[in-house]
Image: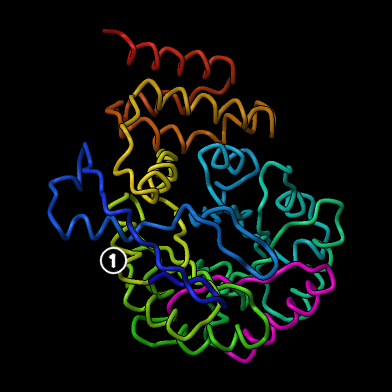
Amino acid sequence: MWREGRKEPEAYEADGRMEHVTRGGFGSGDTKEVEALQALRGLDRPFVVGSLTVPNRVVAAPMAGVTCSAFRRHLKSHGVGLLYTEMVSAQGILHGNRRTCEYVEFTEVERPLAVQLFAAEPDAVARATAWVLERASRPDIIDINMGCPARKVVKTGAGAALMGDIPRAVAMAAAAVRTAAAAGVPVTVKLRTGLVPGDGVARDLAPRLEAVGVAAVALHARAASEFYQGRADHGESAAVGGRLSIPLVVSGDIDSVEQAAIVRAQSGCTAVMVARGMLGNPWLVGDLLWAAEGRGRRPAVTAAEAVNDLLRLFAGARSHMGDARAVRWIRSHLGWYLRRWGVSAARVQGLRLVAEANRLQAELEAVRTGFMAP
């Protein structure tokens, strides 16, 4: 039974048939495998965050340096239900930093979209929220980051540092909720399980956030001290969710259909948030939605199709940020896309050294042609 927020969850019943998976992972007909796949049922259905209806339950995580507008639009074309901006500094907004203010820009095709802010004090997050919501293009959600473990964020008192000061964290959420309420925009919060494994901070903090009006909680099921190491603890996700009546979105180790099914079965979450698992593999979004409909696993993409998708992403980046910035930005994606298809590290490095956009496009087209050759 999956979490729906403040209403009684529907019982997502199978239609009596479960297609056998045709490649990898599931498909043997083993009862446990079928039950695990069943855990994904309902991810293709809408869920409600405050007054906002999100069209499906596959959410793209905010990732610094990655989830710019071009990448968000690309993920939308793959079916993502909810997008986030990169994490945006409230202080940067209040000081009028041009690059920081660019982070909140988006296009209509990216909706529904959350602008994620980080700050150390309630007044700063309230004023930054007001600034964001006074813009002509108003986002659908304001999200407050209370889980980022990066030292440059934590040392300012923001991000995961807030999990060490629950009264301040609650005051920040309340300030954002009060400010956003005037615009009818819901506020959500992204957390870690705690500062260190087993401290139970999120179990204590999450219901307090709900009490001051937070409309949903996203939980990365690792402690801040773990950064991105080890395995995510989705037993802790279930414990946090058990204390909430608002939607719980969970992330951590969701890099395949199989793993997403395990995470959902363990956590009972409303929605899944995919992060590093979709880098170079945006088809994971569609794979999850396909499986959620009880259709088993989608046919695999080919190497040529993967390179074509990379070319499409690059074209979008060039249009969004100009050739020079796009060439620099796409470099990480070259490895994420191409290494999984057997392109050598040396070849990828050579592509990363290409400084001119048209030449890089030609080089990638040559890689695609090579994959298409009989």
Decide if residue 275 is on the left or right side of residue 178.
Answer: left
Give the quadrant of residue 290. top left
Decide if residue 351 is on the left or right side of residue 361.
Answer: left
Give the quadrant of residue 110. top right
Name the amino acid, label 1: Gly
Decide if residue 293 is on the left or right side of residue 136.
Answer: left
Closer to us: 269 or 29: 29
Circle 1 residue: 230
- Above or below — where is 177 with respect to 77? below
Q: Which residues are magenta?
A: 166-193
Quadrant where the N terminus sits is bottom left
Percent coordinates x, y for residue 155 in the rendering: 58, 75
Rendered residue at 31%/32% (across/down): 299
Q: Is residue 283 magenta?
A: no
Percent coordinates x, y for residue 261 in the rendering: 31, 58
Decide if residue 217 is on the left or right side of residue 16.
Answer: right
Q: Is residue 184 magenta?
A: yes
Closer to us: 100 or 219: 219
Label 1 SS: loop
Percent coordinates x, y for residue 355 in the rendering: 56, 23
- Above or below — where is 143 with respect to 8? above
Can you name the residue that lies furthest to the front here? 16
